[in-house]
Image: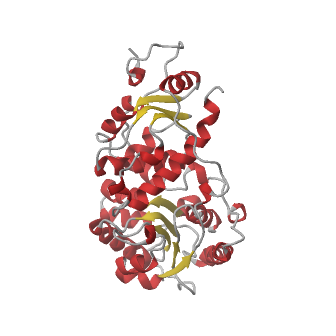
Amino acid sequence: MSSSTAAHGHRPIADVAPLALCAREPHVPADRLVAEMVPPPRFDSVRFDTYIPDPGQPSQTEAVRVLSGFAAGLGGAHASGSGKKRWFQKKAAAPSGPRGIYLDGGYGVGKTHLLASLWHAAPAAPEQKAFGTFVELTNLVGALGFQQTVRTLSDHRLLCIDEFELDDPGDTVLVSSLLSKVVEQGVALAATSNTLPGKLGEGRFAATDFLREIQGLSAHFKALRIDGEDYRHRGLPEAPAPYSEEQVTKAAYATDGASLDDFPHLLAHLSKVHPSRYGALTDDLTAVCLTDVTPVPDQSTALRLVVLADRLYDREVPVLASGVPFDRLFSEDMLNGGYRKKYFRAISRLTALARDAKGLVDT
C-alpha cells in the first residue's frame, strides 16, 4: 500500500491517496534551523499598521507606538551595516533606551503579531534579524552547541523570542546565559513568554516572573503590558463541531496536499520525532485531517501536541477532525496545572484552524 496507510483500513475513494504524517520522519540540518529563524508564514505579511487594536484596550494602541519607536531606534546598532563585527573595531555606542522589550499579555491579544511586526520594521537585512520560539532557540543550541550559537546570533541586530518558557528552570538558565552573551555584542532583544506554574487568573500577565527568571538580563528589558481578550474568539462563532469519520476521510481524499491520520497513531508517532522537526513534518501540507480524536493520555503527549498545534497555526494549515471537540483534548487536571496556558493556547489555535477547515467539507 501507499504511505496513506494512516487512513487505517479506509477503502480508497480516489485514485490518489492522501499523505500521512505518520509516514514522515523528517531530518532537519542545523543550517535549516538557522535559516528558518524568521517569522512563520502566518506572519509573513503582518505589520504594525495591520494590527487592529481593540478600541476598549488603549494599551494595544500604546504598544504599537512604543514598538514602532523601538524599531526605529535599532538603526544605530551594528553601525557598519554588515552584520559582521570585526573584533578589532571599536564597539559602537549603544543606542539610548532599553535594549530589550518584553510584551506582557494573555494569549490571543496579538503579541506574536506585534513581535513579528517589530522584526519586519527593524532596519536591517533579514539575515541580521532572528525570530523564533523559545523551543526553537533551545533546539538551535542543541544543534550548534552553545558557543557556536552565540557566535551566530552575535552577528544579528535583533533577536525576537516568542513564548519564552518560564516553566523549565534548566532551559531558562541556558537561554538567559545565551542572551547575556549576545546582548554584550549589541544585539537588541524582544520577547513574549508563558507563565510559571501555579499562578492565578490563568497566568495572563508574567512580567514579574519573566524579569525575575532572567536575572541579570532584567535591566535590559522594558515591560510593555498588552491588555485584551483572545482575539480568536472576539466576535467569532464557536468552533464547528467535529465531523464524522466518513466526512473527514472524504475531504482528505478530495483535497490536494491534505494528510489523513488516525489521531492516536499520530500521537504515538510524535513521540518518535523530535519537536524541532515538527515544522518539517508539516511541509507542503494544505490541510490536516484527523480521525478518532480522543483526549490525550498524559502530559508528555499533551506537550508534544502543543508544539504541533503551534507549527500548524504558524503555517495556517486547516485541521479537520472527527471525534471529541478540541476543547476536550486536555483533562481538567492538565487545564488546572502548571502548563495550562500552553493547553489553552493549543485549544484556541486548533479551534481557529478548525474554523478554517469548514470549507473542506461538502455541505
Q: In this view, does 269 lie to the left or right of 119?
A: left
Residue 229 visible here: yes
Q: Please indicate whether residue 192 sits to the left or right of residue 116 in the image.
A: left
Q: In the image shown, does 8 or 212 lie closer to the viewer? A: 8
Give the total of numbered labels.
0
Colour scheme: secondary structure
Location of the C terminus (image quadrant): top right
For residue 287, above or below residue 213: above
Where is the N terminus found, in terms of image quarters?
Answer: top left
220 and 267: which one is in front? Answer: 267
* Lateral position of residue 152 relative to residue 249, left or right: left
Tell me the residue at 29%/42% (across/down).
271
Q: Percent x, y for residue 219?
A: 44, 85
> Which quarter of the figure has residue 229?
bottom right
Place of residue 316 in the rendered image (x, y in percent of width and height, measured from the top left): 57, 44
Q: In this view, does 71 lie above or below 329?
A: below
> In the figure, is residue 122 to the left or right of 181?
right
Where is residue 106 drawn, in percent x and y? 52, 67
Residue 185 in picture, x, y percent from top left:
44, 76
Residue 154 in sight from this viewpoint: no
Name the residue located 54 percent from the left edge and 25 percent from the top edge: 247
Pick the residue in front: 192 or 188: 192
